[in-house]
Image: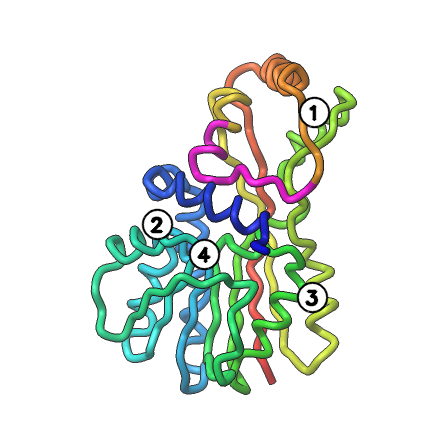
């Protein structure tokens, strides 16, 4: 039986694939920052292949092909449409392969990856800490797992307005970096992480939710939902509480795990 959650995620991103590359500005900015954090590790990573998971349309892929021009690079995503667009955006390179793969179910493949990286994908894992631990096990000794994702403290404005109205906060539960660090520190791995906040502005609450839909971020990972009337109440209340544009805060996590 197919995983219904995965089917919904794949469908949402496939339908949004055409709009994603033009509208996912935060994901693009974060990809550039993640790429900068890869460069200091470039010459310390042992021999082996590089795997990108959750490539989307290629924001991070475009950096990786240049950072690792002499390594075999495997770029993957759950959505065939995303991979197709990624290939168009990145271009043809002899050292690059594009494959449709589910990051949560990628096989060990001889544990021969020197680096596994992903930008804005870990928040879609059912159990981020366990999945990142399993991915780390797929690295060669000295290999590097590098991820960037929105952390659990994101969307405080949305959360606060829901509390004030007595409505359920329906955003998906995002990864808890402390839980991840504790779980992955139980072995002999070296873990470094950095947290930062980033604020985006939208014309109104409705425009914020429409933006999420445009980039495919619509799949619910929990059982919470709002009726049409409650959603309208939230949007109108949120807009009344702000004079002009509304702001949304993302708490971004950048994490590097070196396998000893």
Task: Answer whether labels 4 and 2 touch (C-beta < 8 Å).
Answer: no
Q: Position of residue 67 (x, y in %)?
A: 33, 70
Residue that appears at 40% across and 70% down: 39
Tell which circle, 2 or 3, labels the residue nearer the N-terminal end: 2
On screen, residue 85 versus residue 214, left or right, reads: left
Provide the secondary structure element on which disc 1 rests. Answer: helix
Q: In this view, does 28 lie above or below 148?
A: above
Disc assigned to residue 81: 2
Dot 2 surroundings within 10 Å: few (below 14), some, or many (20 or more)?
Answer: many
Provide the secondary structure element on which disc 4 rests. Answer: loop
Provide the secondary structure element on which disc 2 rests. Answer: helix
Task: Answer whether labels 4 and 1 touch (C-beta < 8 Å).
Answer: no
> How far is disc 4 from disc 2 in space, using C-alphas?
9 Å
> How far is disc 2 from disc 3 in space, using C-alphas?
33 Å
Q: In this view, does 54 lie above or below 239?
A: below
Closest to the observer, 73 or 243: 73
Residue identified by numbered label 4 = 78
Disc assigned to residue 161: 1
Residue identified by numbered label 3 = 181
Q: Where is residue 84 in the image (x, y as percent from the top left)?
A: 30, 54
Provide the secondary structure element on which disc 3 rests. Answer: helix
Residues shaded magenta: 210-222
């Amino acid at each position: 039986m197919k995983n219904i959650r995965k089917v919904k995620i794949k469908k949402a991103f496939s339908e949004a694939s055409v709009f994603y590359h033009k509208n996912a500005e935060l994901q693009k900015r974060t990809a550039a920052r993640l790429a900068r954090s890869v460069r200091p590790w470039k010459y310390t990573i042992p021999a082996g292949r590089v795997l990108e998971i959750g490539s989307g349309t290629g924001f991070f892929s475009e950096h990786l092909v240049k950072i690792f021009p002499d390594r075999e690079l495997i770029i993957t995503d759950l959505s065939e449409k995303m991979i197709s667009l990624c290939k168009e955006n990145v271009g043809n390179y002899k050292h690059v392969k594009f494959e449709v793969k589910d990051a949560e179910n990628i096989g060990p493949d001889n544990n021969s990856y020197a680096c596994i990286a992903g930008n804005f994908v870990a928040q879609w894992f059912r159990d981020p800490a366990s999945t990142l631990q399993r991915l780390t096990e797929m690295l060669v000794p000295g290999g590097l797992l590098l991820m960037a994702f929105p952390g659990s403290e994101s969307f405080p404005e949305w959360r606060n307005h829901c509390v004030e109205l007595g409505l359920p906060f329906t955003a998906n539960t995002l990864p808890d970096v402390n839980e991840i660090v504790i779980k992955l520190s139980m072995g002999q791995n070296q873990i470094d992480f950095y947290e930062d906040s980033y604020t985006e502005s939208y014309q109104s609450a409705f425009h914020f939710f429409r933006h999420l839909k445009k980039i495919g971020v619509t799949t619910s990972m929990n059982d919470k939902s709002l009726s049409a009337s409650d959603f309208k109440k939230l949007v109108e209340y949120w807009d009344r509480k702000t004079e002009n544009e509304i702001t949304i805060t993302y708490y971004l996590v950048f994490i590097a795990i070196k396998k000893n």
